[in-house]
Amino acid sequence: MERRVLGVDRASAGTRLDRWLAAAVPEQSRAKIQALIEAGHVRVDGAGARAAQRLRGGERIAIDIPPPAPETLEPEAIALTIVHEDDALLVLDKPAGMVVHPGAGHARGTLAAAVLAHAPAVAGVGGPRRPGIVHRLDKDTSGLLVMAKSQPAYDALTAQLASRTMRRVYLSVVHGRLAGAEGVIDKPIGRDPHDRTRMAVRPEGRGRRAVTRWRVLERFAQFTLVEARLETGRTHQIRVHLASLGHPVAGDTTYGGRRQTLPVALEGLALHAAALGFVHPVTQQRVEYFSPVPGRIERLLSHLRHEPAP
């Protein structure tokens, strides 16, 4: 990252931050400036910033500018767990700890680079840095995702994602004993105004609508096994929604606050994309895929099942 510290002159009072920065750093587009602000790479007098905030004049603005990303992604021969493959798509079981596509601090070792090495034809599908990627999983979340191998398949799958007809079901171990048998969390999600690297439940009009359906599968002394189904696909949606109920995902240091102590070591989050369903873009048949609970979460469950009940 290149850090620049800029001073705002008094004549710029009243100007939007993103507009001012786009003029002050002309090699960055306004859209890129907005993305940097959203990602927390812009600080105004040491505090987090919003693209639309108005300057008063006299502020000191620090902006971290990442090096330009290469236009193309280099393939990497990394082992993949392939659940299904045909000429149109790949269904993969991603391990926890693997990043889906390159980003800040994660230039190599991505799922996208591995898929590019396995199926070079995906290079022309979607975007050059995200070839074939229809949807994502967080780095520390494991489980199923689908990637398109052709542009028609990509268009059909992303349309299903947008229309909420793609079925995505997750299993998660959360802190505490979740009350009730099932429920729906319908709360908008947007950037945390106090920390732009995090997401948060926001008031109406300040975030995008996010809907998560959940049901309890098993209760333990101090934890609950939950099934969560996404109706929308916001960044960190399940993690933010469950934390908003006071039951953060086990292993989640970002949204778990002080509730991070676990009875056994856990690699990544206790969050696993266990089922994925959609209409195949070629056959037009409904297909469903399932992934068993990975060993890292199964070990936690085994320990919890042997703990004494409250």
Image (cartoon, grey):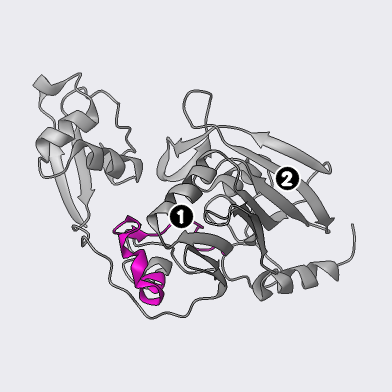
SS at mark 2 in the image: strand
Position of residue 52 measured from the top left corner of the image (x, y, whole percent)? 30, 26
**Residue 259 falls in which quadrant of the image?**
bottom right
**Residue 219 falls in which quadrant of the image?**
bottom right
**Foreground residue, 132 or 88?**
88
Q: Identify the mark nearer the N-term, 2 or 1.
A: 1
Q: Residue furthest front?
A: 283
SS at mark 1 in the image: helix
In the picture, measured across the screen, residue 60 lies left or right of residue 201, that is left
Is residue 251 inside the magenta stretch?
A: no
In the picture, measured across the screen, residue 119 lies left or right of residue 20, that is right
**Foreground residue, 217 or 13?**
217
Q: Residues within 10 Å of mark 2 (few under 14, many from 20)?
A: many
Quadrant, the C terminus:
bottom right
Bounds of the magenta segment: 114-142
Work out whether residue 77 can be spotted: yes
Q: Amino acid at mark 2?
A: Trp
- In the rendered view, would you say 9 is above or below 289? above
Position of residue 46 measured from the top left corner of the image (x, y, whole percent)? 28, 40
Which mark, residue 153?
A: 1
**Foreground residue, 273 or 124?**
124
- In the rendered view, would you say 248 is above or below 221? above
Q: Report which residue position mark 2 lands on.
A: 214
Q: Amino acid at mark 1?
A: Ala
- In the rendered view, would you say 230 is above or below 282? above
Residue at image x 48%, y 53%?
135
Is residue 141 inside the magenta stretch?
A: yes
In the picture, measured across the screen, residue 26 lies left or right of residue 267, that is left
Q: CA distance from mark 2 to mark 1?
A: 30 Å
Residue at image x 43%, y 57%?
133
